[in-house]
């Protein structure tokens, strides 16, 4: 991992990031290093899997495994357990308990999967196996199809089973508990077979599970007014940040990103806050003049995840320190990715600048 450098990049981080103390919410967040994987990089898996893993990692749906050196691994080709997949569903959808939940003989309050299983069962997503949840049991492709279908039945318009070509290993009358889920999920392209085979009893890999879950998330429908509300949230988020930075209200900036940022996006802010505070404490003077006539256009907007392209976002920034004057890149156009929290509020979890200069500014010292 590259080392952070001081100097111009540190000073210019003020264009985006709050300056001031780290809130208690930030202190509990993961550092940037824990969003950088060692085994999932461009080319290591197919493009769809790479993007899905990145979205889930950056938005805190998954954490990956951390070795003794602090390096993060996803192990996309390894199998995934029932417990791990249920946690993924609950995190991705921001679920809370809804009404009565099932009790499982192998899960006690305080155990690793108790909360996720309780929440998922209250939504009818899991029903258990003979009175047990079996959280450590490797999950099969059929089980994933069933859980995904149950989780998204009310938010994804599933196609008719009869419109789908049959899998030879899932004939009519087989797998009565999973037949409808397999074929309806396949009709929507959420799950896919290998030729004429679905391989329902094969264990799913971690990468496959993440891809299937992400496909379903992207198929959730939203009304036009809900899409407009998501775009309005992002535009207001940027405008509020601009206003606070013009006023040099760094405490207000910290509070803004605390409320409206999460995951990788907030981790970057957390990382730079100390560095920028150092240079401001050295007596730096900053002048920031933003252009508020930027555009916000949807790339995709679904029930829980969204991405918007922010274009024509320019500004003028000058930082003076010890008789030296420094300037920042003028084009802050970027792709913003967002996720709803458990209360149904949008939060930004990632920003991908279009300009190389702006990319180097925000992620100075890290490879994406």
Image (spheres, grey):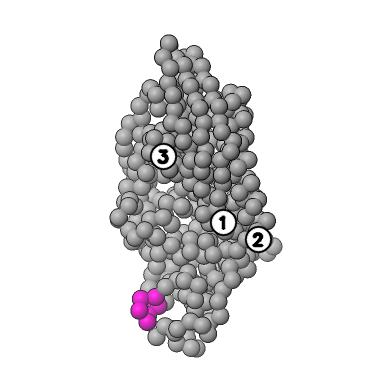
Q: Position of residue 258 (x, y in %)?
A: 58, 37
Under circle 3, the secondary element is loop
Please name whichever residue, 187 or 117, is drawn nearer the observer in this view of the structure: 187
Q: Residues within 10 Å of mark 2 (few under 14, many from 20)?
A: few
Q: Residues within 10 Å of mark 3 (few under 14, many from 20)?
A: some
Q: Quadrant of the C terminus?
A: top left
Cα separation, mark 1 vs mark 3, equals: 24 Å
Please identify the dominant SS of the magenta region.
Answer: loop
Cα separation, mark 1 vs mark 2, equals: 10 Å
**Residue 195 lies in magenta, yes or no?**
yes
Looking at the image, which residue is at 36% across and 47% down? 37
Under circle 2, the secondary element is loop
The residue at which mark 1 appears reads as 301
Among the two numbered marks 3 and 2 on one chain, the one whose residue lies closer to the N terminus: 2
Among the two numbered marks 1 and 2 on one chain, the one whose residue lies closer to the N terminus: 2
Q: Is residue 137 left or right of residue 90?
A: left
Q: Residues within 10 Å of mark 1 (few under 14, many from 20)?
A: many
Please tell me the numbered disc located at residue 223.
2
The residue at which mark 3 appears reads as 355
């Amino acid at each position: 991992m590259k080392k952070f450098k001081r100097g111009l990049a540190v000073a210019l981080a003020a264009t985006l990031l709050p300056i001031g103390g780290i809130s208690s919410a930030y202190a509990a967040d993961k550092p940037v290093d824990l969003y950088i994987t060692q085994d999932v990089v461009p080319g290591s898996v197919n493009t769809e899997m790479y993007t899905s893993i990145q979205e889930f990692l950056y938005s805190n749906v998954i954490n990956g495994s951390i070795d003794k050196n602090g390096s993060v691994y996803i192990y996309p080709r390894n199998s995934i357990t029932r417990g791990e997949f249920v946690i993924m569903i609950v995190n991705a959808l921001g679920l809370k308990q809804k009404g009565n939940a099932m009790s499982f003989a192998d899960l006690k309050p305080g155990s690793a999967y108790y909360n996720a299983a309780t929440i998922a069962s209250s939504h009818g997503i899991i029903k258990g196996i003979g009175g047990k949840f079996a959280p450590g049991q490797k999950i099969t492709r059929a089980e994933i199809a069933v859980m995904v279908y149950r989780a998204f039945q009310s938010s994804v318009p599933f196609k008719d089973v009869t419109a789908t070509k049959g899998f030879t290993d899932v004939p009519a009358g087989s797998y009565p508990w999973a037949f409808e889920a397999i074929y309806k999920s396949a009709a929507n392209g959420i799950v896919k077979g290998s030729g004429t085979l679905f391989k329902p009893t094969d264990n799913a890999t971690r990468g496959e599970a993440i891809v299937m879950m992400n496909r379903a998330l992207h198929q959730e429908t939203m009304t036009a007014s809900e899409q407009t509300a998501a775009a309005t949230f992002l535009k207001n988020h940027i405008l509020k940040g601009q206003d606070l930075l013009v006023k040099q209200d760094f405490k207000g900036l910290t509070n803004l990103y605390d409320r409206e940022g999460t995951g990788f996006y907030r981790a970057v802010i957390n990382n730079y806050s100390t560095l920028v505070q150092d240079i401001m404490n050295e007596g730096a003077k900053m002048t920031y003049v933003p252009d508020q006539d930027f555009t916000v256009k949807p790339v995709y907007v679904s029930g829980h995840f969204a991405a918007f392209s922010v274009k024509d976002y320019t500004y003028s920034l000058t930082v003076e320190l010890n008789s030296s004057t420094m300037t920042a890149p003028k084009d802050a156009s970027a792709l913003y990715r967002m996720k709803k929290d458990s209360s149904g509020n949008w939060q930004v979890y990632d920003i991908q600048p279009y300009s190389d200069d702006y990319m180097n500014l925000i992620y100075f010292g890290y490879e994406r």
